[in-house]
Amino acid sequence: MPEEVVSLFSPIQDGVIVDATLGGGGHTAALLARLDNSVSVLGIDRDPAAIDRMFEHDRLRLVVGNFGHLDRILASQGLDEIAGVLLDLGVSSHQLDEGKRGFSYRHEGPLDMRMGPDATRTAHDIVNEASLNELVRIIRTLGEERFARRIAGRIVEHRPIGTTAQLAEVVRQAIPAATRRSGGHPARRTFQAVRMAVNEELSALSAALDSGIEALRPGGRCVAISYHSLEDRIVKRRFRRGEGRAPGPVLPVAPPVELTALARKVVKPGEEEVHRNPRARSARLRAVEKVA
């Protein structure tokens, strides 16, 4: 959603915008090309390969790092405050399309799924060493998969599992035939769950939102693009908390207002963008501005 991202950051006339999930660099390239020359970008990615692929630009700094440690990264760059932060979540197209990275159920590869060298476990470790109950929890919670227990049981029965193709087939066999014929690839949710567990994505997202919002100067903006309900729920709740809305049972008193929503409803990609990039279909964009 590069057009929406550029539009949301266009009022910023100077300072540093952090692209905390650099990926292929499309958003960063658009920001550098279309924003004021007084705006620079700090690009961060867990994957050293993403940094190696990036172009050079006099207003671009690059860092290999986990956005869950955004506070440390900003400190290491001498940044006390920033003008904006962009979080484009999930796995990048480069990672999905490279079979040897082990992210895809469509390409043969080793069970890896690490977004960067900082991950302490691989998909192989989880698939072959986790207990039945831990597998059920991972697949049900992170994949929102209703057949989690059947899938986990089949995985345990077929260990050791060494490749993405083997795992995809085990999952396919565990799902009832009627369900396999609808709703996309039957292994999609399980692969998502294992990948998120390997990379501890939800905890990293929560930490990045807190650190990014804390570092924003007044008038600074945070834009987050999520691709499934778990990510979107975390973003939505953090933004609402910053807006002083819906305190709920955990926060019986409404928190102070530090953010204002830039769009009351979640922004979805248009038909033209989905046609160009089918993977964008599930994208959900939310954006806020810091007011205090």
Image: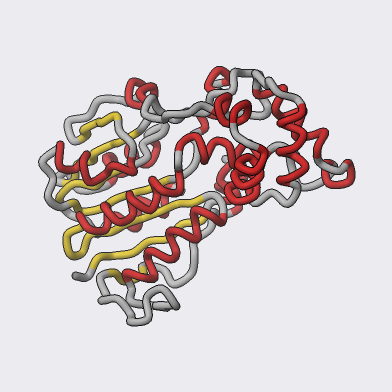
Query: In the picture provided, is 76 more to the left or to the right than 196?
Result: left
| Vertical placement of residue 115 versus 34, above or below | above
Residue for point 64% across, 51% down? 144
Of residue 290 and residue 242, the one placed in the foreground of this image is: 242
How many numbered marks are there? 0
| Vertical placement of residue 202 versus 103, above or below | below
Query: In the picture provided, is 219 more to the left or to the right than 223?
Result: left
Residue for point 68% across, 21% down? 161
Of residue 104 and residue 111, the one placed in the foreground of this image is: 111
Residue for point 28% across, 42% down? 69
Of residue 80 and residue 123, the one placed in the foreground of this image is: 123
Specify the quadrant of the image occupied by residue 292: bottom left
Residue 281: % across, % down: 60, 49
| Vertical placement of residue 264 versus 20, above or below | below
Residue 245: % across, % down: 38, 77
Specify the quadrant of the image occupied by residue 275: top right
| Vertical placement of residue 268 versus 264, above or below | above
Q: Is residue 97 visible?
A: no
